[in-house]
Amino acid sequence: MDIMSNTVRKELIQLRRKFHQCAETGWLEFETSIYIIEFLKSQGLDLKYGKSIHGERIGLPSKLKMDAHKMQLTQMKVDFDTSEILEGYTGAVAILDTQRPGPTVALRFDIDALGLEEAKEGHRPFLEHFASKNKGMMHACGHDGHISMGLMLAKSLASQRDQLSGKIIFIFQPAEEGVRGAKSMVDAGILNNTDYILSGHIGFSKKNQVVCGTGGFLATSKLDISFTGKAAHAGAHPELGKNALLAGANCALNLHTLTQFGGGMSRLNVGILMSGTARNVVPDHAHLELETRGETQEINEDLLERVYRMIEASAHMYDVTYETKLMGSAPSYQFVSNEFTQHIKDIFGELDLEIIEGGSLGGSEDITYMLRTVEKKGGHGLFLLFGTDLVAPHHNPRFDFDETVLEQGYNCYMKIVTDLLEI
Ligand SMILES: [Zn+2]
Ligand SMILES: [Zn+2]
């Protein structure tokens, strides 16, 4: 089977640049999803989108933000119903069913951008006219490249369906940043009866390298907290007030003492603390945003329990009320070398790449929900890292990558899928 032609190479770059321009953050991938669906429909694939591919979504932006982003969209003429997508049921799932018996292979590509203002001066996407057209939103993690790989794989594999057996599920997942989208899709059952789940990420390794099997994913929880007290005149009757700012500040300070575990590393960061209205008013509201991480699922769960206790105690100290909201979560995942991963390593030998086994992401990624779901049922999962030169690190306004990584990633996926499904 032909792995790469010049047309594929060119189209991979074109698609990457098209999606780079319409960068949209988690649950706001309206235009992104519509373009993806349009492309996949034209390849004659069965499509699922909207509410049918989601369970309960967490970490949604406010209605105000959703409406504002909807207003910005240029009218798109498409022949399918986009109403649920525009309510934030973003992403898409395409199914290529060869109608021949064989395994089911799922490929997952994350599609969201980051809340960053893209750099201009000396920044290639700006100089070559494919910078983000959305203010304060930018593909600074390479997910534009992931979408491009996913769409081209769908196109190529659809055109080769006569030579394949089994089923391929292409998952275009929203809201990976902040670890929000995967659980919602898993809960909707999109991975039921899946034998293999494959995914990957651009970067985190050197050019011309592929990391075959990534672990070291930390379990994480993202939490919003609000304390509500009572405002009062700070001079005349401060005793009538209930100080939410002090509850929040005490809580933040004490939360940072909780990360001591003997069984593995853990992290906690209060990233936002906002409170107060004026110097002469006892503050009646405080808002905190924090995240926890743990080397194992157990550590993160234990840490989170202690976090909740600290919140309750802080509220009690200042006689204020509190509310918490889980905004994102992902379990941990460790790479374990097995027959399947060894086999993939062997077949990668035919690619012109340096193969590294068992890398570590050193962060969190909600693909872990999908890896765990499939492996729990006896299936296999694999997360690849496609090495590339980066102009600036991930999540930086100057982030950009060497686009040859697109064909390398595409080739890796193609190699695995054809190995598993070729007749
Ligand atoms: Zn990222
Ligand atoms: Zn990413």
Image (tube, rainbow, N blue to C red):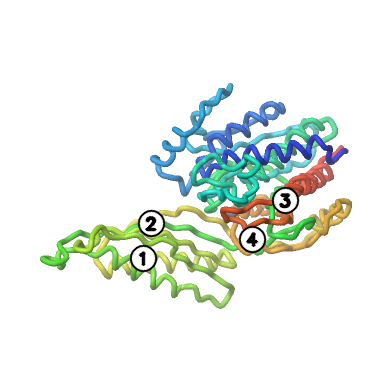
Residue of label 2: 324
Residue of label 1: 311
Name the residue located 57 percent from the left edge and 43 percent from the top edge: 174
Q: Is mark 2 within 8 Å of ligand 1?
A: no
Q: Marks 2 and 1: in contact by CB < 8 Å?
A: yes
Q: Which mark is residue 399?
A: none
- Determine whether the residue tagged by mark 2 lies in a helix, strand or loop: strand
Q: Earlier in the sequence, mark 1 or mark 2?
A: 1
Residue 383, horizontal then vertical, whole percent:
70, 54
State how far apart marks 1 and 3 are (Cα). Answer: 45 Å
Q: Viewer-nearest of labels 1 and 3?
A: 3
Residue 217 vertical position relative to residue 366 in the rendered view, above or below: below
Q: Marks 1 and 4: in contact by CB < 8 Å?
A: no
Q: Which mark is residue 402?
A: 3
Residue 130 vertical position relative to residue 400 in the rendered view, above or below: above
Residue 151 vertical position relative to residue 294 in the rendered view, above or below: above
| Nearer-the-camera pick, 209 or 132 | 132
Q: Marks 3 and 1: in contact by CB < 8 Å?
A: no
* The N terminus lies in quadrant: top right
Residue 369 in sight in this render: no
Residue of label 4: 333
Q: Viewer-nearest of labels 2 and 3?
A: 3
Q: Earlier in the sequence, mark 4 or mark 1?
A: 1
Residue 254 located left or right of residue 367: left
